[in-house]
Amino acid sequence: MAEPSKKEKHRAYETATFAAGCFWGVEEAFRGVKGVVSTSVGYTGGETDNPGYEQVSTGRTGHAESVEVIFDPRVVSYEELLDIFWEVHDPTTRNRQGPDIGSQYRSAIFYHDDQQKEAAEASRAWLERSQQYRRPIVTEIVPASTFYPAEEYHQRYLQKRGFVRPHI
């Protein structure tokens, strides 16, 4: 997926930001979705300015490993992106996904406007009512803060190494 040109950036693209454990697999889940213009892995939700991986991995910066998704809402809706978010991780484990443990691996939706907040809350409520999970959903729904892109070697990590899943 190529980065959007200056002309394309002026279109009505929107941003979604999700944390669902290690950002490598989460990015890959969104990267090939029709209507997703670009993805970037990074850190958000914490107190430290311009953190790096080494700092975030200590769990002391307050940041979560996250994926920023730039998307064209005329092609893919925010609600469809929320569906993917719920599918790619276990939203019932606090500060943990699989073998990755710490607040940097928490489940969180970082909303960018009131419509995203409402959609995220409605989506979580629907999932809770569905009783798909035996344990309570612990996903945070919080305002987006500064997103700090991760180091280049983390961007498209799985793609660079040939570990690419089929795209949704």
Image (cartoon, rainbow, N blue to C red):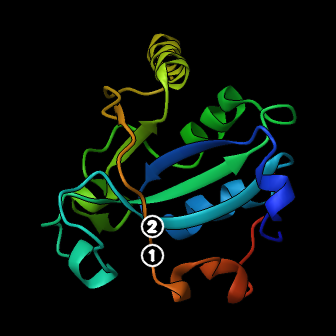
Quadrant the N terminus occupies: bottom right
Q: Which residue is mark 1?
A: 150
> Left or right: 104 with respect to 98?
left
- Mark 2 to mark 1: distance in Å? 4 Å
> Left or right: 29 with respect to 7?
left
Amino acid type of the residue tagged 2 in the rendering: Gly
Q: Which residue is mark 2?
A: 42
Q: Secondary structure at mark 1?
A: loop
* Disc 2 and disc 1 in contact, CB within 8 angstroms: yes
Horizontal and vertical percent position of residue 30: 69, 54
Which residue is nearer to you in this view: 32 or 40?
Answer: 40
Q: Could you say which quadrant of the image residue 73 lies in?
A: top right
Task: Write the residue at 67% across / 64% down.
Answer: 28
Q: Could you say which quadrant of the image residue 64 lies in?
A: bottom left
Q: Could you say which quadrant of the image residue 161 lies in?
A: bottom right
Q: Residues within 10 Å of mark 1 (few under 14, many from 20)?
A: many
Which residue is nearer to you in this view: 49 or 65?
Answer: 49
Task: Write the residue at 74% across / 86% down.
Answer: 162
Horizontal and vertical percent position of residue 134: 37, 26
Horizontal and vertical percent position of residue 61: 17, 65
Q: Secondary structure at mark 2?
A: strand
Pick whichever of labels 2 and 1 is earlier in the sequence: 2
Amino acid type of the residue tagged 1 in the rendering: Ala
Task: Write the residue at 59% across / 78% down.
Answer: 155
Horizontal and vertical percent position of residue 10: 78, 48
Which residue is nearer to you in this view: 6 or 102?
Answer: 6
